[in-house]
Amino acid sequence: MGHTVYEESKAVDDSDSKEDIPLLPLKGKEKTKNWKPSDSCVVVVGTTGTGKTSTINIYTGSELEVGEGAQSVTGTTIAVEDEIHANVNAPRWIDNPGWSDSDGKSDNLVFKELLSHMQTNKLPMVKAVVWCVLPQPRMDSTLQAQAKFIDMFTDKNDKGKIWANVVIICKGKLARTAYEDCQGARMAAKNAFTLADPMCLGYEFASDEVLEGASEKLRKESLRMLTKEEIRIELERIFDDLPPCVQVVFSNQRCQACGQTGDPRLMEDKCHRNKKGGHTGKLEQRFSKLQIGVAAAGGVAGIAGLTTAAVLAPGAELALLALPVVMGPGTVMSGHRFLNSSSTSQSPCGGIKIVDMRWSCCGAQELAPGGCTDLCDLCGAVWGKDPPCVLIRHPDSNLQQGMVGYEVHVKNHDLVDIAIEHNKF
């Protein structure tokens, strides 16, 4: 059966440059009131090799390529039309590269790519999050990390609301019931949100031998072996019992520390470290060459005047006593400039040195406390404007590959809302 694949999102590179996660056109926080079924989607997430793409094919009638094991086949995020349920304006299904991907793609970047795709294609309404897992009775760090990503679909105003629309699908069987096989994922869900109680479906594909030799009751209830048609029917039943769609609200914010704008979940996990006072200008001499020249010229004129007075009038001794007064400013300023240097430079004349340089941006002394501009204490860039310099989240294991000498300073972006017009979907 044919299928329609909507616009692919731009692939996200795994390097740490800011351009790798482009910020999207800003959207507002207002809730979508008059949304259409075509605005809704079913998001499929989970570790590579847990049956994400095959689940989409079973439910929608698509023929997406399916991989085996831990090697991902789905390289980018795509939205797929539901051909089987098209007569009821069914939601589109979103497939994306799996988490814990063996080719090294960061889980964090995969999640950002997923959100970016939803915003770019105007699919803010989530009918269901289908979380594909393998049978696992205990919670581990991988499931915990995935549960945190799922919890991030809704913001603090709707904290935990997404979990009523989460369906855990477990392909494979270890325990007696599907809920026991999904127990590790359910525990991770509750770890992310205490009241989380996602629905579960566990199955194995029914082989021809089982279909021929086992009764339907035994096959379905004890063996939990289902045909593709039966899996689709079970999913239809579960979806009918789900509450209304949950809106993923994209906020419109700016970080006051590094200047990034857009939804915080799409921002790069880098920022400036700490704010300090500083200067953007350069160190300059307190007295300029022009000032010294003017003072020296005044001294020469004064000497000429005193010399004339001493020749033409009595009291020459008093005139000579006034010479230091007229010569002093130019001499002092010239000496000051000669001996004056920055606090970090060597003395220009043996051990004699004056530290009285001034900042060109504000005229303050070099060693005066504070500064006229807020700067980053790590890179010295202007606070709130220049590119970020430090990671504020520990990179996951995949992202760490190829990263050398990075620094992590755990903090949150310093966010403020941005008010713009026409900011609804």
Image: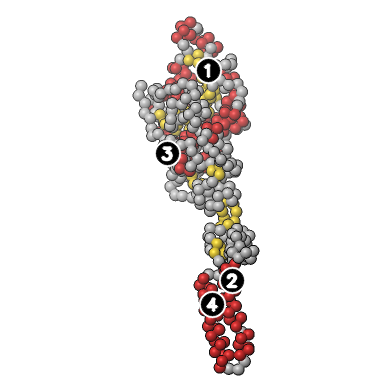
In the structure shown, which secondary structural element does the residue marked by tag 3 occupy? helix
Q: Which residue is mark 4?
A: 296
Question: Distance of mark 2 from mark 4, alpha carbons?
Answer: 12 Å
Closer to the N terminus: mark 4 or mark 3?
3
Question: Which residue is more in the foreground, 365 or 12?
Answer: 365
Query: Horizontal placement of 346 versus 129: left or right?
Result: right
Give the percent coordinates (x, y) of residue 338.
57, 68
Q: Name the residue located 53 percent from the left edge and 83 percent from the top edge.
A: 301
Q: Which residue is mark 2?
A: 335
Q: Name the residue located 54 percent from the left edge and 73 percent from the top edge.
A: 292
Closer to the N terminus: mark 2 or mark 1?
1
Viewer-nearest of discs 1 and 4: 4
Structural crowding at the residue carrying mark 3, measured as other residues with C-alpha within 10 Å and reported as few (<14), some (14–19) or many (≥20): some
Give the percent coordinates (x, y) of residue 51.
48, 22
Q: Is residue 72 above or below residue 361?
A: above
Closer to the N terminus: mark 1 or mark 4?
1
Identify the mark at residue 120; answer none if there is no mark: 3
Give the percent coordinates (x, y) of residue 197.
58, 27
Residue type at the position of mark 2: Gly
Viewer-nearest of discs 2 and 1: 2
Q: Name the residue located 40 percent from the left edge and 24 percent from the top edge.
A: 64
Query: Does residue 365 appear in this view?
Result: no
Closer to the N terminus: mark 2 or mark 4?
4
Closer to the N terminus: mark 1 or mark 3?
3
Give the percent coordinates (x, y) of residue 253.
51, 46
Residue type at the position of mark 3: Thr
The answer to whether the residues at label 4 and label 3 have Cβ atoms under 8 Å apart is no
Identify the mark at residue 252; answer none if there is no mark: none
Please identify the quarter of the rendering in which residue 316 is found: bottom right
Q: Residue furthest left?
A: 2
